[in-house]
Amino acid sequence: MPTVTKDAHKPGDYFVDYESKVFEDVKADPGEKALVTFHTMAFEGSIGLVNILNAIRLNKKGYETSILLYGPGVLLGVQRGFPKIGDEAFPGHQNFNKNLERFMAEGGKVYACRFALQALYGSGEPALIPGITPIMPQDVLDCILLHKKANAVIIDTWTV
């Protein structure tokens, strides 16, 4: 049997060069916009959290950033917790909520489709995280089109 001759990794070690950035750090020009759409399920993959973090980063780069929650994406924006709303039942349980709240506190806007909330998921506007704006289903397309007309950066988040 071959033997391992290297020391075991320990806290503080790293596997990659995390200091060498390849591309310039792009900043928004005044008035530039960004939209991150979510048609994905909470807790069924990392993409929901990753793109909320991308929206936060776009905001920090100076883009007027909006998040659009529609279809199953509205479930990212509901209040959650166990045994009480706001309680963290397990580590990371409140990741979506905390990061959406942070995004809004830093000036980002979040919209959630009323149709998906009620017709698809049996929920309503009172279940949304405070600060999220409920919108009509017809507004979903118009939100995307208005951002497209403004030449916004658009990141679409879909899972199937």
Image (cartoon, rainbow, N blue to C red):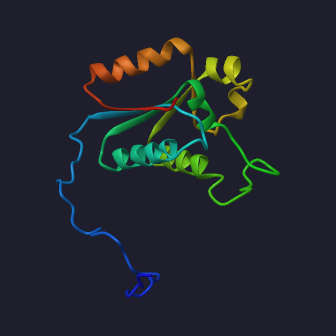
Vertical placement of 155 versus 15: above or below?
above
Q: Residue furthest top?
A: 138
Q: Which residue is drawn at 53% across and 50% down?
A: 99
Residue 70: image location, x then y, percent: 54, 25
Q: Which of 160 and 48 is in front in this view?
A: 160
Residue 32: image location, x then y, percent: 26, 34
Q: Residue at x 62, y 21 (%)?
A: 116
Q: Residue at x 30, y 48 (%)?
A: 61
Q: In this view, does 51 lie to the left or right of 92?
A: left
Q: Quadrant of residue 80?
A: top right
Total numbered labels: 0
Q: In this view, does 76 lie to the left or right of 140?
A: right
Q: In this view, does 142 lie to the left or right of 102?
A: left
Residue 90: image location, x then y, percent: 70, 58
Q: Which of 86 and 21 is in front in this view?
A: 21
Q: Which of 20 and 79 is in front in this view?
A: 20
Residue 98: image location, x then y, percent: 58, 51
Q: Which residue lies furthest to the right in this view?
A: 83
- Location of the N terminus by quadrant is bottom left
Q: In which quarter of the image is residue 142?
A: top left
Q: Is residue 143 left or right of residue 111?
A: left
Q: Residue at x 67, y 20 (%)?
A: 120
